[in-house]
Image (spheres, coloured by chain):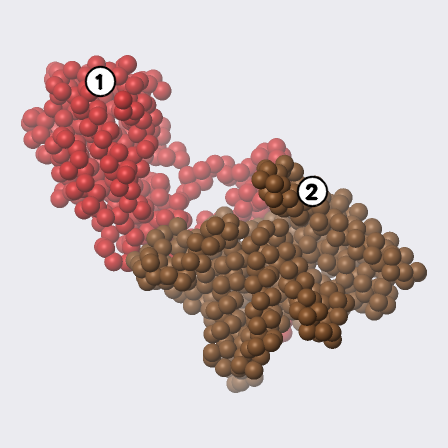
Amino acid sequence: MLFSSISFLFFFLPCLLLCYYLVPSKIKNYILLLFSLLFYFFGEKKYLLLLLAVCLTNYLFGRLLEKTNKKIVLILGLASNIGILFYYKYTNFFLETAFSLFNQKAPFLNIVLPLGISFFTFQNISYLCDVYKKEVPSQKNFLTYCMYITLFPQLVAGPIVRYKDIEKELKQRKENYTLFSEGVTRLIIGLAKKVILADGMYTFSINLLASQNSFLTSWLIAIGFMLQIYYDFSGYSDMAIGLGKMFGFHFKENFDYPFTATSITDFWRKWHISLSSFFKDYVYIPLGGNRTTKWKNIRNIFIVWFLTGFWHGASWNFILWGIYFFILLIIEKFFLKKYVKQGFFSHLYTLFFVCISFVLFSFTDLFELGNFIKGMFTIKNGICNSDAIYYLKNNGILLLLAIIGCSPILKQTIKKIQKGKERKWFQGSSIFVLLTLFIISVAKIISSSFQPFIYFRF
Amino acid sequence: MKEKTISILFVLLLFIFLIASLVVKDKEISYAERRNLTTIEDVFNSPLDNLEHYLSDQLPFRNILLNLYSWVDRIVLGNKENNNIYIKNDVLIEKNVPYNEKSVEEFSKKINYIVANHLKNNRVFYGIIPDKSYFLEEKGYQKINFSQLFSKIEKEITIPSINFLPLLNLEDYYKTDIHLKQNAYFKIMNELAKKYAFSLQEIEWKEQTYNPFYGATYAKGAFFSRPEELVYYKNEDTESSIAKHLEYGEKNVYDEEKLGSMDSYSVFLSGPSAWIELENQHTNIEKELILFRDSFGSSLAPLLLPYYKKITLIDLRYISLEKVEEYLSFETQDVLFLYSTLLINESNLLKVKMK
């Protein structure tokens, strides 16, 4: 089930709200668990039992870790999680790679990727590590642990919510109008980001991709992909955070205007924060981080970025994507540190390399990828053509809205107004704007066969 | 206060849709979208596959929401097209790009092949109906290079043409459909009469109307302009003629049962059909016409009935030339190839194997 679907918005959500807010506090968690399992069942009925088995295994490992605090238990726990992820996500990729070394065709195993496996695996890993490090006690109630893992807002596409961040709220949380309305606001903004901006940018890029090639066309496609991926994923994160708030949870922010970054390092502090902080805390620092020799530090950075790329998909382009960022970060760390601080050129430099990174991200076929990147740096097919102008004009307003939405301008303006004299007028009109945005988003869902969220692949 | 208002209004909205979905009776067909809607039976057959389609198809206020987004897309976001459909002054125009030169060449070769192998003793012409995008201005829209297409065809096809272009304009087409209105063909009758050497008669045509007509592009573009009026013309010839279809058997020339169906345009000769013989019982004229055509020919043929004893309509998209050779003996009939630029740009659909 997608958040941007009619079944979710007008059936699942109102039924859950009704049940959740009618029952006494003691039962609320069970209601959330039941609906979360239903949510998963409608998306992936085949793997519901697998999901429950994974919950049970990690619950038991957690309990055992707390009692024994033995490294071997942690290793076994981590191995079980990584083993499952590896089997479902990477088996075919490794078979294909191994067979291709001998010029043989690999047998294709029909392994369907369980929905959200990359996310719930990392949540389980973070839980086991934190229990081992005694940063958090293990969860004694199996159903509560199940609810943490299966909690529908973050189950299938993140953000990666750590147990220690919501441990208290799993036991006791306060729902109120302020939190609920903040949740509604985030949900509507996220929905609009996904269905209007992300899907609009997707159509823009795909139409251009099918048209005649030129230098400008290639760059417009690259920008379109960059914006689509941003709005798709940040839109989903907004909805997840918003839905969490509607039920009394506070999930951490996952995006912080990443396209305003002034360096690649800065970009990764603002993009998919829950993933980069996961790799930092559970891979980079345990490996020694930067408190080691220069070469070991480079090795650690390489491992983190290789894994980051590979986590996004079992395909060479994602590995390339990770290595691309590794190279950029190393260059920045050892050579460019002094130069990339603030200012227009630092910003331009970051956007340029980030834009190319999303081309690597978007093309799984390496041959197509190579051709496309060539097109971005050659004027062999002309600088511009009528198709590029046509699509640019036709999508100009959407593109402008997408660019404005990437910057904090809107947020800052709203804050200013809220502090100013027009506060009352603004409050009334913001409710109207928000609900109109919701209705328009629903209309968009109805009017198009919507695109599935990109991050469901991972 | 603001928090309370947002929360209450949002939840209220969710419940309005939920309750309305449960209360409002399901619809089976959407005439506006020209398709069958997913019903509860489909959900019972395959719940997980069909549930989302069902809920979306049966959502209350569906058409209002579709209208709303098409408005936002066009007016607010300034998008000229939707699903390859343009809207200009309330007229929905299908995009016909890119220009497929190979297809145009192939089309010409196929026509030449039929002429060279079967039509040595016939009076043969070809006519091209431009699709609506021909009337869009060059700037701001994507359209094929029509002058290139027409000059290529003129160069390649060996038989003479009947030039309809100066006679037609955008108002001659339905606003929500790709086809010409039937009365537009009256304008080209004079040209046809000259070429096929028949004299036009003073015929009293009775105008028949059907409203609301939702054309083929009405739903595809999701622009949801107003439905329009479909007009067709009857006289003694059309009333006394029989349409013999290869697929459906004998039918009336105007299949009025089709009015109000998902495709009301099928009132003309019952819609897509591989082979139709129109036999005029009302005339003493002995002339026959073979009309190689796409769907544009369906509304022209009834108007030609007063001048022919028999009109054979052949749609090579649905029947191969080899089959046509089995059924038809080419003698001295008049022959007209009447095709739209939509088909010419996609001529691989024509089942003509050149030996």
Q: Nearer the viewer, residue A11 or A280?
A: A280
| Residue B152 spot, x, y in % from top left | 19, 40
| Amino acid type shown at disc 2 | Lys
Left/right placement of residue A155 relative to residue B143 reads right
Q: Is residue A52 above or below residue A270?
A: above
Question: Would residue B15 be found to the left or right of residue B274 on screen?
Answer: right
| Residue indicated by mark 1 | B279
**Please, what is the three-letter code of the amino acid marked with disc 1?**
Glu
Give above or below for B266 relative to B327. Answer: below
User: Which chain letter goes with mark 1?
Assistant: B
For residue A45, which numbered disc appears in the image? 2
* Chain coloured brown in the rendered structure: A
Chain the render paints red: B
Per the image, label 2 sits on a secondary structure element best described as: helix
Please tell me which residue is depicted at 61% across the width and 35% down the height of the picture: B46
The residue closer to the viewer here, A423 or B91, is: B91
Front of the two marks 1 and 2: 2
Q: Residue at x 36, y 28 (%)?
A: B257
Total labels: the figure holds 2
Q: CA distance from mark 1 to mark 2?
A: 60 Å
Residue at x 69%, y 42% (from the top left corner) = A45
Q: Nearer the viewer, residue A38 or A234?
A: A234
Label 2 crowding class (10 Å Cα cut-off): few <14, some 14-19, many 20+?
Answer: some
Q: Chain of mark 2?
A: A
Residue at x 38% of width, y 64% of height:
A396
Which picture quadrant has residue B229?
A: top left
Q: Position of residue A298 (x, y in %)?
A: 66, 69
The quadrant holding residue B317 is: top left
Mark 1, secondary structure of its residue: strand
